[in-house]
Each structure stands twice: as structure tokens, then as C-alpha cells.
């Protein structure tokens, strides 16, 4: 029995179909609302508005559930490789041996970037924010591969573009890092894993063979998996909207990198460490920071806390918090901000303001502590988020493209000046 929603407007009753998802989520399909009633809906920030029906990632915010194509994040983070999870998100299933070998080999063969791109990096000022460099470099990939701009996008072009982007993002990320530390860029090595290759390009130097630390490789593999997709978040929605105009994948993902940069989104992992450092430097009681976060007249927010969907706990934060203890222990790193983070979490979660609003640590609260222990500079933290999120962006763009979804173009309610006659300069 198909459900319907009834609405009475100006004394007339209207019915709209109800959509039920595979996890029994419900939505009212208002795609014919304006045509039949003349009304639109209003929902700033789209807090109650679905933009698509997607088969990629399922979140249950009340129960802290996150699954990629039906697989629990806890299983994938513990048992899968990031390149396997990338394949899963993009193509819909975990790869068998043959598929994994083909995908992994193809990605490996496309890791190098055009030599001309080195000149782009030389033009950036020293200390340029790596996210600004990354979004520019990703967009410029489209200039080297004009076939990627074919709006009809035959499947071979799409697959080649996908493999190129998955392959080249770590190379570009490492080059952004090397630009700012003034060290020579390292070329990719085909005998390394996806994560190992990134480590080699980030920390390797020409003078010696870089030795992959398995603890670091495992930690990055887990962190990339935990960041790989998250349904219709700000940056993914950006990728889908830009892609809906039939812009190429490089341009769409470049826009996603820019959206992720914001401190309310992926930029929060950098903001969390800066906040913890400020708390440590000032030395004032944690409660005073909690009080500031609750004070509406104070712009301070507890960065790394709160989430649009998770209202009990972010399952990724739980996994990362545990990993932070393990990785710092294994590396013998004693970072005082980890203790501050744990104490801050304890104080906040005993404060009615946070509990009542369902504000818990999110994925960004502990991730920066691990990145720091791995020797990654703070301004590279959101780049690390982008490296993890890339397969999610690609899978969502591919789904939107294959479903031939309409161009994203929201409506508005106009509240500006009504019609008025033009007046000459002397009369104003
Ligand atoms: C990510 O969407 C995703 O899936 C994102 C992400 C992904 O994987 O893609 O999970 C990654 O972006 C995680 C979020 C990282 N951002 C931060 O940690 C920044 C700090 N958090 C917030 O600014 C906020 O919680 C958001 C942006 C995450 C969510 O904001 P919402 O859903 O728009 O909620 P809101 O701003 O309307 O807040 C609701 C209430 C408000 O108070 P009241 O008006 O009810 O009195 O909670 C308060 C807010 O003032 N509040 C906070 C707070 N977050 C919300 N108060 C203090 N500190 C905070 N961090």
C-alpha cells in the first residue's frame, strides 16, 4: 500500500506520495508541489530536505550507525584496505581478487602528474594553505585531460577519469606539503601500496629510501576509510550540484575540496587542534571554555562537537578516539592535548546544554591528534580529510550522473524591494 501525505492549502486538500527507503526512512515527495499548489517549501541548510535517493551510504543519527553500501564502518575500518573501500563506494560491491588487482594496478599506473604542474606549485607563495593549492590543482587536472570534459561521458572516459583522480590526489597533496616545507617533491613508486605511496611522497627524500612504518600506514588506512563517505554532507552535496550541470569530475571534486575547507565542515579538524592548543596555552579551567561555547553572545564554539545527523554519538569518533590511544602508545608519543581533549569531552558530556542538544564529539574531534602524532602539520589536516573523502565524492558524482538527475537549482522566496520607478542621480 503506497502511503500519501495530505496538505490543506487555501482550503484545498492536496496529496503527495511518501517515499520509503530500504532502511524504512520516510520522505514526502514534493516534486509536484509548486506545479499543483503554487507553493514552495523553505528549509535553510536543508535540515529537513532530501536532495536524492542514494544507495551509497546509510547513516542512523539516533543510533550512531554508519554503513558504506551496507557494510558496517566498524568492520571496514578494521578489516579492509582503503583501496578496497574506494572500489566499494564507487562501483557498489567489495572487489574480488581480479577486480581489486585491476583497479589497484590502474590507479598505480596513473599516480604521476604532468611535469607542468610543478610550475603551478612554484607560483604559490610559501605557506600557502594546502587546501587552496589542492582545490586549484584538482580543477587544473581537467585542462590536461580534455576528454574528461565530454558531457556525454562514455563509460571508458568516466572510468579513466576516476582512476586518474584517485591516483593523482595523493601525489598533489604530497606536493602541496613539500612546497611549504621547501623539500624536493618525490615521484610515486609503483611497488608501494596506495597509502604507502602517499607516505613515501610526503616524508621521503631523494637522499635515502623511505621506510614505510606499518603503524603509520595502518593508522592512515583506517583514517582514510573512516572519512571515505558520509551521504549528503556539505562537500558531497556541492560535488553533486556542480556535477549536475554536467561539469567534469575534476571541477566537481575541486568544488568539494573548497566546501570541505570550511571550519564548520572538514576544516574543523584543524580548528580543534588550534582550540586545544589555545586551551592549553591559556590554562584557564575547562568549564570556562564550555561556558563560552554555551554563550550566544560569544562566537566561540566547541570545535569537533555537534553534528547535523548524529545526535547520540558519531561512530567514527569512537573508533578514532580508541585509535588515538593505540597509535600514540605505539609511536611513544605523549601529546598533552589528547588529555585535554578527553577532559573537555568529559566536562561537556556532563553539561545539560550539550546533552540536551545532542552535541557529542564528531569525526574531527580526535583525528587531528593522530595526524599530529604522525608528523602531519595542522594546515594539512583537512587535506587528509579530502584524501579520505575522495572515493565518496566520486561515487556520489557517478550515481548522480548515471541517474541523470536534473541540474540542482533551488527556488527562493523574494523579500526585497517591490517594483519601483528608476530615478535619476539628481533626484536620489
Ligand atoms: C563534519 O554533515 C556531515 O556528515 C559532516 C561530516 C562528514 O563526514 O562529512 O560529518 C564532517 O563536518 C563534522 C562537523 C565538523 N564541524 C565542527 O565540529 C564545528 C562545530 N560544530 C558545529 O558548528 C555544528 O555542530 C555543526 C555545524 C556540525 C552542525 O550544525 P547544525 O546541525 O546546523 O546545528 P546548529 O548549528 O543549528 O546547532 C544546534 C544548536 C544551536 O544551539 P540553539 O540555537 O539550539 O541554542 O546546538 C548549538 C547551536 O548553537 N551548537 C553548538 C555547537 N554545535 C551546535 N554549541 C556549541 N558548540 C558547538 N560545537
Image (tube, helix red, strand yellow):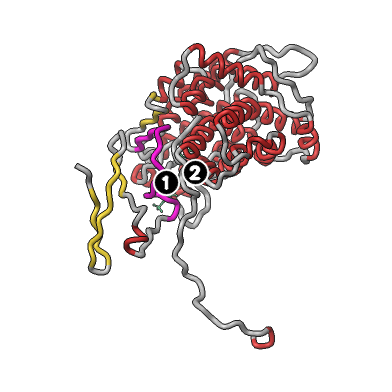
- 130, 153: nearer the viewer: 153
**Mark 1 highlights which residue?**
51
Quarter of the image with the C terminus in it: bottom right
Res 279 visible: no
- 158, 221: nearer the viewer: 158
**Mark 2 highlights which residue?**
237
In the image, which residues are magenta? Answer: 44-61
Residue 227 place in picture, x, y as percent? 50, 30
Residue 183 place in picture, x, y as percent? 78, 26
User: What secondary structure characterizes most of the magenta part?
Assistant: loop
Q: Residue furthest left?
A: 1
266, above or below 104, in the image: below
10, above or below 158, in the image: below
| Side of 241 where 149 appears, left or right | right
Residue 107 place in picture, x, y as percent? 61, 21
Instruction: Report ligand 1 position as a quadrant.
Output: top left
Which numbered tag is attached to residue 84?
none
Q: Is residue 50 magenta?
A: yes
Q: Which image quadrant for residue 74? A: top left
Helix, strand or loop at mark 1? loop
- 87, 205: nearer the viewer: 87
Amino acid at each position: 500500500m503506497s502511503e500519501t501525505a495530505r496538505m490543506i492549502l487555501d482550503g484545498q486538500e492536496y496529496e503527495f506520495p511518501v517515499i520509503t527507503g530500504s532502511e524504512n526512512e520516510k520522505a514526502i515527495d514534493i516534486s509536484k508541489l509548486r506545479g499543483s499548489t503554487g507553493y514552495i517549501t523553505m528549509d535553510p541548510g536543508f535540515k529537513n530536505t532530501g536532495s536524492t535517493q542514494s544507495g551509497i551510504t546509510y547513516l542512523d543519527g539516533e543510533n550512531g550507525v554508519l554503513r558504506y553500501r551496507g557494510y558496517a564502518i566498524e568492520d571496514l575500518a578494521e578489516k579492509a584496505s582503503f583501496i578496497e573501500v574506494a572500489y566499494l563506494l564507487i562501483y557498489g560491491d567489495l572487489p574480488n581478487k581480479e577486480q581489486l588487482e585491476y583497479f589497484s594496478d590502474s590507479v598505480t599506473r596513473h599516480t604521476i602528474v604532468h611535469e607542468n604542474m610543478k610550475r603551478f606549485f612554484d607560483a604559490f607563495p610559501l605557506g600557502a594553505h594546502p587546501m587552496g593549492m589542492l582545490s586549484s590543482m584538482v580543477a587544473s587536472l581537467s585542462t590536461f585531460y580534455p576528454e574528461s570534459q565530454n558531457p556525454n561521458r562514455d563509460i571508458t572516459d568516466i572510468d579513466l577519469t576516476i582512476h586518474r583522480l584517485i591516483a593523482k590526489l595523493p601525489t598533489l597533496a604530497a606536493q602541496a606539503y613539500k612546497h611549504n616545507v621547501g623539500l624536493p617533491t618525490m615521484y610515486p613508486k609503483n611497488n608501494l601500496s596506495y597509502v604507502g605511496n602517499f607516505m613515501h611522497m610526503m616524508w621521503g627524500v631523494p637522499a635515502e629510501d623511505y621506510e614505510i612504518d606499518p603503524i603509520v600506514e595502518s593508522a592512515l588506512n583506517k583514517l582514510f576509510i573512516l572519512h571515505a563517505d558520509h551521504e549528503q554532507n556539505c562537500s558531497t552535496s556541492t560535488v553533486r550540484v556542480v556535477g549536475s550541470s554536467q561539469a567534469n569530475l575534476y571541477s566537481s571534486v575541486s568544488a568539494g575540496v573548497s566546501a570541505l575547507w570550511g571550519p564548520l565542515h572538514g576544516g574543523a579538524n584543524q580548528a580543534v587542534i588550534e582550540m586545544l592548543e589555545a586551551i592549553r596555552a591559556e590554562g584557564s579551567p575547562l568549564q570556562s571554555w564550555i561556558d563560552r561555547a554555551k554563550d550566544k553572545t560569544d562566537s566561540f564554539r566547541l570545535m569537533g562537537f555537534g553534528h547535523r545527523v548524529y545526535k547520540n554519538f558519531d561512530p567514527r569518533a569512537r573508533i578514532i578516539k580508541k585509535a588515538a590511544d593505540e597509535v600514540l602508545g605505539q609511536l611513544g608519543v605523549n601529546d598533552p592535548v589528547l588529555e585535554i581533549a578527553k577532559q573537555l569531552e568529559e566536562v561537556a558530556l556532563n553539561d545539560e546544554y550539550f546533552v540536551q542538544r545532542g552535541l557529542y564529539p564528531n569525526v574531527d574531534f580526535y583525528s587531528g591528534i593522530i595526524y599530529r602524532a604522525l608528523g602531519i602539520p595542522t594546515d594539512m589536516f583537512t587535506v587528509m580529510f579530502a584524501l579520505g573523502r575522495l572515493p565518496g565524492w566520486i561515487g556520489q558524482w557517478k550515481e548522480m550522473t548515471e541517474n541523470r538527475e536534473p541540474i540542482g537549482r533551488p527556488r527562493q522566496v523574494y523579500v526585497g524591494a517591490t517594483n519601483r520607478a528608476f530615478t535619476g542621480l539628481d533626484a536620489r
